[in-house]
Image (spheres, rainbow, N blue to C red):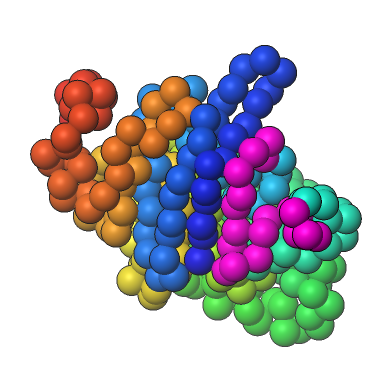
C-alpha cells in the first residue's frame, strides 16, 4: 500500500528526513514512534503530498505520490490531480479541524456532497451510519463547540471515513485530548484495524502500538532507527537509542 525509498525532506537548511525506507502492506497498521522533532509527522504529511519530498520516491498503491515519471525525470502533478489522489487517503490530525458552523452530521456529509457529488439524502444516511460506528449517533445534531475533544476527534475520524479511503493516516490523534478521553478514540481505531483498514499512525500510545500495530517504526533525527514486530521493537529493542526512548515513556 505504501512504499518509501530514500525519502528526504528539507525545510531551508534543516534536513528533516534523511532517507526514509519503509513499506506498509495492505491491511497493516504501522505505528511511527519517536521523540518530538524526529520527522514522524513530516513523513506522514509527505504520504499525501501535504509536504513535497526533496529526494527519493514515495508511492501509494504503486502510484507515485504527487509526481509522474517521464523517462528518468519526475514531474509534479497538477493540484487537481493531487487532490484526486488524496481522495483515497484519509487523514486525522492532532487538532480536529472540524467546521465550527456545521453539526457533526454536516461535517461528515460535506466532502461526499461537495467533492464526490453524493446526493444529500445518501450522504446524510452514510454520515449517520459512520457516526454510529464511532459511537456518536446521539450527537449528530451537535456543533463542535458542544462536543468534548474526544467526541470531536471521533467525528473527525468519521469525516475521513466518509470518503471511503483505502489508507488512513493519523497524526498523534490523542495528543490533544485529556487522558480520560483517549480510550474512546483508541477504541475506534482498534475497530478500524480489526476491519482491515490500512493505517499509518504517529503516536506516543505505546500500549496501542504494541496491541494493534503490525509494525512499529522508531524514528529519531530524520532516520528510521529500528523497525519490526512491535512485540520485539517495544519489548526487546536492539538499538540503544530505542531503549533510551522507551525507558522514558514506559
The percent coordinates of residue 6 (x first, y second) are: 53, 42
The percent coordinates of residue 164 (x first, y second) are: 61, 73
The residue that appears at 15% across and 47% down in the rendered structure is 232
Foreground: 122 or 163?
A: 163
Q: Quadrant of the C terminus?
A: top left
The percent coordinates of residue 214 (x first, y second) are: 29, 59
Query: Does the segment drawn in magenta span residue 57?
Result: yes
Foreground: 240 or 105?
A: 240
Q: Report whether 7 appears left or right of 230.
A: right
Q: Is residue 62 above or below residue 102?
A: below
Q: Residue furthest front?
A: 72
The span picked out in magenta is: 53-72
Query: Does the segment drawn in magenta span residue 172?
Result: no
The percent coordinates of residue 241 (x first, y second) are: 25, 23
Q: Report whether 91 appears left or right of 195.
A: right
Whether residue 106 is visible, yes or no, is no
The residue that appears at 40% across and 70% down in the rendered structure is 27
The residue that appears at 34% across and 43% down in the rendered structure is 217
Foreground: 167 or 100?
A: 167
Amino acid at each position: 500500500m505504501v512504499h518509501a525509498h530514500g525519502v528526504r525532506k528539507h525545510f531551508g537548511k534543516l534536513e528533516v528526513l534523511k532517507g526514509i525506507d519503509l513499506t506498509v502492506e495492505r491491511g497493516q497498521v504501522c505505528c511511527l514512534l519517536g521523540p518530538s522533532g524526529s520527522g514522524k509527522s513530516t513523513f506522514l504529511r509527505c504520504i499525501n503530498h501535504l509536504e513535497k519530498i526533496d529526494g527519493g520516491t514515495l508511492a501509494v498503491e504503486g502510484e507515485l505520490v504527487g509526481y509522474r515519471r517521464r523517462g528518468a525525470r519526475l514531474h509534479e502533478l497538477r493540484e487537481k490531480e493531487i487532490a484526486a489522489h488524496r481522495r483515497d487517503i484519509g487523514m486525522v490530525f492532532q487538532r480536529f479541524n472540524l467546521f465550527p458552523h456545521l453539526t457533526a452530521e454536516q461535517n461528515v456529509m460535506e466532502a461526499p456532497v461537495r467533492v464526490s457529488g453524493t446526493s444529500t439524502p445518501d450522504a446524510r444516511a452514510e454520515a449517520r451510519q459512520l457516526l454510529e460506528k464511532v459511537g456518536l449517533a446521539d450527537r449528530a445534531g451537535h456543533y463542535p463547540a458542544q462536543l468534548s475533544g474526544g467526541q470531536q476527534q471521533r467525528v473527525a475520524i468519521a469525516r475521513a471515513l466518509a470518503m471511503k479511503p483505502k489508507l488512513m493516516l493519523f497524526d498523534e490523534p490523542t495528543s490533544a485530548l485529556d487522558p480520560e478521553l483517549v480510550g474512546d478514540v483508541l477504541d475506534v481505531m482498534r475497530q478500524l484495524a480489526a476491519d482491515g483498514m490500512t493505517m499509518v499512525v504517529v503516536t506516543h500510545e505505546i500500549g496501542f502500538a504494541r496491541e494493534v500495530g503490525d509494525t512499529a517504526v522508531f524514528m529519531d533525527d530524520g532516520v528510521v532507527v529500528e523497525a519490526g514486530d512491535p512485540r520485539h521493537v517495544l519489548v526487546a529493542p536492539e538499538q540503544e537509542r530505542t531503549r533510551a526512548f522507551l525507558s522514558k515513556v514506559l
